[in-house]
Amino acid sequence: MKLGSLLTEQANPASASIDAVSTLEMLRIINDEDKKVALAVEAALPKIAVAVDAIVAGIEAGGRLFYTGAGTSGRLGVLDASECPPTYNVSPELVQGFIAGGDRALRKAVEGAEDSRELGAEELLAMGFCCADILCGIAASGRTPYVLGAMAKAKALGALTIAISCSPGSELSEAADIAIEVLPGPEVVTGSTRMKAGTATKLVLNMLSTGALIRLGYVYGNLMVNVQPTNEKLVDRAIRIVMQAVGVERDRASELFEASGRLVRTAIVMGKLGTSKADAELRLAAAKGRIQIAITQAP
């Protein structure tokens, strides 16, 4: 493949003189290009939705979600994975990210690490990846050997594979069961895919993890209902969530929270239905933790 033919490597005529304009005009050029990113993501929404539903099905069947990439792509995957436990109180094992060059590459570039397919496959296996898991390979160019090696190994194991790239018809897309191509166009600084491509990738990753965890019941309305009250701040947040979800004053929300054993989802079901802790827990178990189902269907 001629790398110069990739969309992510093309020169952008809109920024051809960016080094000769005022600072304000320079920033306007960057901002105008950034506006294209959300539209590019919008065009990919149908494929993103397919990926979210597939991730949910995989997790419900006992699998985990893994991200892999090199450089910016790898860092964004690790970032998204690392933010799932503090946001939704899920196990760090549920969503994991690994990057070419290892954790050291999160801060400093590890030259050459991305060029080995074998290393991508080896490090996938070192993470404990198995056939029940899902691998999301991330590469703006769609041709990173490290990512392609991991994807090939995942497919050989029989696992579901998802690709995120910013180049059309890429080798990475062809290697995946579900190919998400977000095409915001050439970068303001030619080839600097940490810019529009990186922003596009971050938006897609936000949707994959957030969408999957919403579908899995970690959100009710727009509230994080799996918060664990491990300190004073989180106790206060939990009570406020119960207040908003049930539509009660703080005193009543506090009563429900304590009566539930300090379990936010249980407290909400108790408050919504006027039921006991035992009944609320039975309903939630039948609904696999999804509050909306627990309060609308009999256990």
Image (tube, rainbow, N blue to C red):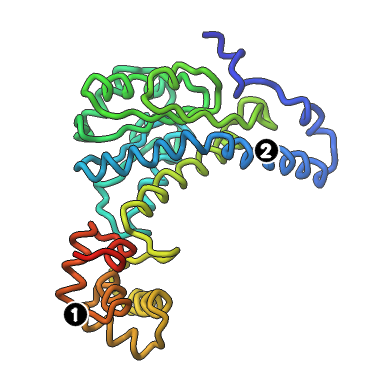
Residue positioned 32% across, 77% down in the render: 272
Q: Residues within 10 Å of mark 2 (few under 14, many from 20)?
A: some
Where residue 259 appears, x then y in whole percent?
A: 21, 83
Q: Nearer the viewer, mark 2 or mark 1?
A: 1
Q: In which quarter of the image is residue 127?
A: top left
Q: Name the residue under label 2.
A: 36
Instruction: Name, please, the residue furthest toward the bottom.
Output: 251
- Can residue 226 be seen here? The reply is no
Inspect the image, locate mark 1, and give the three-letter code of the amino acid beneath it.
Ser
**x, y percentage for residue 11?**
70, 22
**In-image side of 77 versus 185 (left or right):** left
Identify the element where label 2 is drawn.
helix
Q: In this view, does 132 lie to the left or right of 246?
A: left
Neighbor class of circle 1 (other Cα within 10 Å; few <14, some 14-19, many 20+) is some
Residue at the extreme right: 21
Mark toward the start of the polypeptide (2 vs 1): 2
Check disc 1 and report the residue beneath it.
276
Residue 176 shows which numbered tag? none
Specify the amino acid type for callout 2: Lys
Image position, residue 137 (x, y; %): 39, 29
Residue sitting nearer the eye, 264 or 229: 264
**Residue for point 45% across, 36% down:** 108
| Residue placed most toward the observer, 100 or 275 | 275
Q: Residue, x 56% and y 35% (percent of image)? A: 194
Looking at the picture, does residue 117 appear above or below residue 260?
Answer: above
Q: Depth check: give the residue in front, 208 or 26.
A: 208
